[in-house]
Amino acid sequence: MSHNCSAVIITCMDFRTQPALHRFMKENGLIGDADVLSFPGGPQLLANDFNRNSKFASEMALLSVGLHSVRTVYLIAHDDCMAYGGSDAFKSRAVEREAYMTDLVDAAAEIRSLAPKLNLEIVYKIIVMDGDGWVVINFTEGDLNP
Ligand SMILES: [Zn+2]
């Protein structure tokens, strides 16, 4: 049995976002084909050198990439993340998402520095509240411009 999988998903542990994450994984054929690394704040830990948990998160990302030969890294932030103090900590939704995007870009740089020889595809996503539930949407720097 192969020990390889297609992707690693690095996301926040927040329980509110898990149904959306599971739907996203199912819709994209990632169930059973992706490592899921779930930390408080998710990619934020890789983006910042907060504490020993940051080192742990980096080591887990490298383990997944190396051990399971993943080629795609999903970095998933989410609205109202309490690792940032929640939405109330920001002046506006645009400012909030700018903070997430900054950290996703920094997390991507950290991952590339950990595995400089690998040609990893890094995909940014964000889990947002939509009506009654949370959904996963694409997240690009262009989304920050209203
Ligand atoms: Zn969170």
Image (cartoon, rainbow, N blue to C red):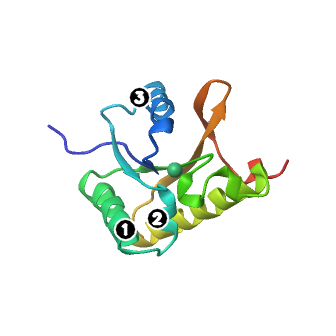
Residue 132 in the image: x percent, y percent?
63, 24
| Amino acid carrying mark 2 in the image | Leu
Dot placed on the residue nearer the N-terminal end, 2 or 3: 3
Residue 136 is left or right of residue 5, and the answer is right
Identify the residue at horizontal 46%, vertical 64% (top origin). 45
The numbered disc on residue 16 is none
Residue 30 in the image: x percent, y percent?
39, 33
| Amino acid carrying mark 3 in the image | Gly
Q: CA distance from mark 1 to mark 2?
A: 7 Å
Residue 47 in the image: x percent, y percent?
52, 67
Q: CA distance from mark 2 to mark 3?
A: 26 Å
Question: Dot 2 surroundings within 10 Å: few (below 14), some, or many (20 or more)?
Answer: many
Up-down relation of residue 117 to residue 134 (above or below): below
Q: Nearer the viewer, residue 66 or 126?
A: 126
| Amino acid carrying mark 1 in the image | Asn
Identify the residue at horizontal 68%, vertical 50% (top origin). 140
The numbered disc on residue 53 is 1
- Residue at disc 1, secondary structure: helix
Instruction: Name the mark nearer the viewer: 2 or 3.
Output: 2
Question: Dot 1 surroundings within 10 Å: few (below 14), some, or many (20 or more)?
Answer: some
Residue occupied by mark 2: 45
Image mark count: 3
Identify the residue at horizontal 46%, vertical 66% (top origin). 46
Instruction: Name the mark nearer the viewer: 1 or 3.
Output: 1
Q: Nearer the viewer, residue 39 or 123?
A: 39
- Residue at disc 2, secondary structure: helix
Identify the residue at horizontal 59%, vertical 27% (top origin). 133
Marks 2 and 3 close (CB-CB < 8 Å): no
Residue occupied by mark 3: 29
Marks 1 and 2 close (CB-CB < 8 Å): yes
- Residue at disc 3, secondary structure: loop
Q: Quadrant of residue 39?
A: bottom left
